[in-house]
Amino acid sequence: MTKQFSKEQAVTSAKSDIWASFRLVSAYPEKEIKKILKKRSTLRDALAEQILMATNRSYAPMKSKWITEVDGNVRRVAVPASIKKWWRQCPDGTIQICVYHRGKMLELAPGKNAIEINSHAELLPTLNLINVSIDLGDFDEFL
């Protein structure tokens, strides 16, 4: 003979204080986590190019391209890539930094899409702060 158990008959045991201290949530889907991390990585890589362009004025990003010579030989050559600077100097002397993702300017607040700084000396520290902000997840909602 088998005994039939029902949930109503089972005695609910009291949970410990440790169990009560846990913050129970539903698990975040792994695919969503990978998407977010990939978008952050893409934005960080683009920002790294901007930091290199800000630190070294002679820096020219390169990309490789296959060319066919007149005699039919095919070879790979490095050509300069055209990358848009994220910062502009305004007529009043301030500098505005716009953050781009996939060629589109991100709207950082409703109706506002640039960060304003006073001088070129603040450019590199501000770009580094943007990098930290990306790592903290502040830009996830914009991507």
Image (cartoon, rainbow, N blue to C red):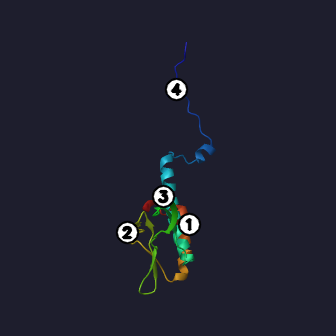
Residue under the point 63% across and 45% down: 18
Q: Which mark is residue 9?
A: 4
Mark 3 to mark 4: distance in Å? 51 Å
Label 2 vs 3, first from the N-terminus: 3
Label 3 vs 4, first from the N-terminus: 4
Mark 3 to mark 1: distance in Å? 15 Å
Residue under the point 52% across and 26% down: 9
Residue 56 vertical placement versus 19 (above, below): below
Label 2 vs 1, first from the N-terminus: 2
Residue under the point 56% across and 48% down: 23
Q: Residue furthest front?
A: 71
What's under tag 4, amino acid-wise?
Gln
Q: Which residue is mark 3?
A: 39
Q: Quadrant of the C terminus?
A: bottom left
Circle 2 packing at 10 Å, graded few (<14), some (14-19), many (20+), is few
What's under tag 1, amino acid-wise?
Val
Q: Which residue is mark 1?
A: 132
Label 3 vs 1, first from the N-terminus: 3
Label 2 vs 4, first from the N-terminus: 4
Q: Nearer the viewer, mark 3 or mark 1?
A: 3
